[in-house]
Image (tube, helix red, strand yellow):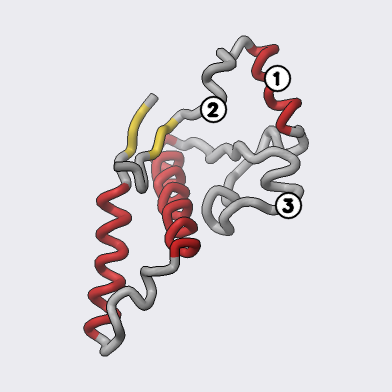
Amino acid sequence: MQNVELSSTYEKLLSSIDWWTDAHGGEKGTFTSNEHANANTKSRLRMVTLYQIAGTVGGMVVGTGNKVEDYGIGFYTKYGDGGVDIAPIADLYKTEVWELGRHLGVDPRNHRLLLLRWTVGRQ
């Protein structure tokens, strides 16, 4: 598993937006204080990183969204975790994903299959 540290990049982005706002007569935090928007920005930053790595190695970005969460109720970030090249488990319910994991011999204590572990927002 590889770690890509993005927390400092995220903080620098917000700082740059605050600087720009202040330089143009606005109030600091105007565009960086909304927690929902900030969470979506983190997801989009991860996606930019995934596409950079995939593009460098000639790979694809593979989605991990299942039938209900991403493709049923639409619980994903537009241009973030929803922006993938292929979504191989999009038609599977979560229980079917778990069943597939058992069939493939995935350790049930490891409920996430990750190629990259992200550290955005983790301290």
Q: For this rendering, which residue is in front, 59 or 79?
A: 79
Is residue 8 toward the left or the right of residue 81 in the image? left
Q: For this rendering, which residue is in front, 58 or 112?
A: 112
Spatial CA distance of label 3 from label 2 is: 21 Å
Tell me the quarter of the picture where residue 27 sits: bottom left
The amino acid type found where label 3 is placed reads: Ile
Spatial CA distance of label 2 from label 1 is: 13 Å
The amino acid type found where label 2 is placed reads: Arg
Crowding near the residue tagged with mark 3, few <14, some 14–19, many ≥20 C-alpha atoms within 10 Å: few
Is residue 34 toward the left or the right of residue 72 in the image? left
Tell me which residue sits at (25%, 66%) in the image. Answer: 15
Using the image, tell me which numbered label, if any, was put on residue 73.
3
> Which is nearer the N-term, disc 3 or disc 2?
3
Question: Considering the numbered disc 1 on the image, is that residue within a helix, a strand or a loop?
Answer: helix
Tell me which residue sits at (56%, 13%) in the image. Answer: 107
- Percent across and percent down for residue 67 are 74, 40
Reply above or below: 58 against 25: above
Question: Considering the numbered disc 3 on the image, is that residue within a helix, a strand or a loop?
Answer: loop
- Percent across and percent down for residue 116 are 42, 32
Tell me the quarter of the picture where residue 112 sits: top right
The amino acid type found where label 1 is placed reads: Leu
Q: Which residue is mark 1?
A: 100
Reply above or below: 18 against 119: below
Q: Which residue is mark 2?
A: 112
- Percent across and percent down for residue 50 are 44, 43
Tell me which residue sits at (49%, 36%) in the image. Answer: 59
